[in-house]
Amino acid sequence: MSAGAGPALAAPFRRFAAVDCTQDPLYVAICQAVAEAPELLALMAEAPATQRKPNLLLAALHEGVLAGVAHPLRDYYPSVGGTRLPDAALPAALLDFARLERPRLIEHLRQRSTQTNEIGRCAVLWPALQQIAVLTGRQELALLDFGASAGLNLGVDEYRYDYGRFALGAPAAAGRPTIACDWLGDAAPPPARPWRLAARAGLDPAPIDVGDEAAVRWLRACLWPHDRERALRLDQALALARRAGWRVQQAEDCLAAVEPWLDGLPAGVQPLLFNSWVLYYFSAEELTRLRERLGRLVRERGLLWLSAESPAQRPPGLALPPLAPGAEPSTLWTLQSATGVRALAWSHPHGRWLQWLG
Ligand SMILES: C[S@@+](CC[C@H](N)C(=O)[O-])C[C@H]1O[C@@H](n2cnc3c(N)ncnc32)[C@H](O)[C@@H]1O
């Protein structure tokens, strides 16, 4: 680590503790400890410059804990049954763990990036599919999850959605994920209309194989250790995905794989491309290319394009819709068809709430 790099590396950890992970006392304490420990900051410097983010080191440490490394640090992690609250002994335990597990941590820091697959987003995807069935008059939908990760959002019709005042989706059953989501605002859900996924597939440059325990452990490690609800539904969705065998195709250039997917669909289905929290990986040039190419497929091939991204990545020219009390400008759901673009919903990035825009 070069002289002067320490403060630059420490600042994101201080910010993460003060702003980003305040709900997780363990992560607050770890980030504060890392910011004060030059040896741990030097570890962070092993990651490529663009990846030197607190989330990555936190996930690398969590992965070691989840992999079963026997060490007192485990006692602090609720994800492995730990009940010890952060205390004065934590910084020393952290340093000791990092020394013992250094090769494993360095491998993660050099080679991985944080990767999640959040089925909470299906609490918005499900009514969006219903809305699409209403708008198009088609019951047979074909879903392409672009940037699918492990492909767990392909199971949208297998999950249950509890919106408080009402529920949607599959019937409640043992082992079936139930996603709790606050339905904000006055808009009613789209009118009931039967639809089914006649085809489903995913694309990703780095898909997670749901049958590969080490790969799946990295998905779990990227969740925060105190959030047992997210961890449980991830495990339930993984079990469903293993049984169902939904396919996520690896493609360096996912955009080039969209047209062949369209070509292979049965006649009469409504094709829908869906991306959620993928476009921030794209440079401005890549985003322009994506918009041109998908725009052409929307106009010429009847593709619908459903995008759930940060408002900064919304389709050009679309005005930001007003927010209901309690909603924040976090994830904007837009639908592009041959007749234009409309905003469908605002939502929490993990689907904890949604504001339907009708
Ligand atoms: C934050 S994850 C979101 C995964 C999933 N869409 C979800 O909502 O849970 C972003 C995903 O985008 C994928 N990705 C990155 N660059 C991409 C690209 N150029 N084309 C398609 N997917 C990409 C990553 O591999 C990762 O699986």
Image: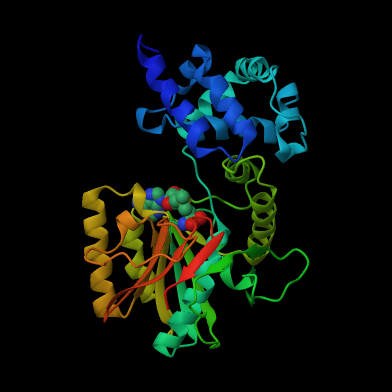
Q: Which residue occupies the extreme front position in the image? A: 325
Whether residue 40 can be seen here: yes
- Residue at 52% in and 17% down: 40
Viewer-closest of 206 and 84? 84
Q: Where is residue 223 in the image (x, y as percent from the top left)?
A: 59, 44
| Vertical placement of residue 66 versus 283, above or below | above
Q: Where is residue 41 in the image (x, y as percent from the top left)?
A: 48, 18
- Residue at 59% in and 64% down: 181
Q: Where is residue 135 in the image (x, y as percent from the top left)?
A: 40, 86
Viewer-closest of 130 and 243? 130
| Vertical placement of residue 119 versus 104, above or below | below
Residue 198 is left or right of residue 303, and the answer is right
Residue 182 is left or right of residue 79, and the answer is left
Viewer-closest of 115 and 162? 162
The C terminus appears in which quarter of the rendering? Answer: bottom left
Q: Position of residue 36 (x, y in %)?
A: 52, 15
Q: Quadrant of residue 344?
A: bottom left
- Residue at 27% in and 66% down: 319
Q: Quadrant of residue 147?
A: bottom left
Q: Which residue occupies the extreme top position in the image? A: 3
| Vertical placement of residue 196 versus 37, above or below | below
Q: Which colour scheme is used?
A: rainbow
Whether residue 205 can be seen here: no
| Vertical placement of residue 61 versus 239, above or below | above
Residue 263 is left or right of residue 225, and the answer is left
The N terminus appears in which quarter of the rendering? Answer: top left
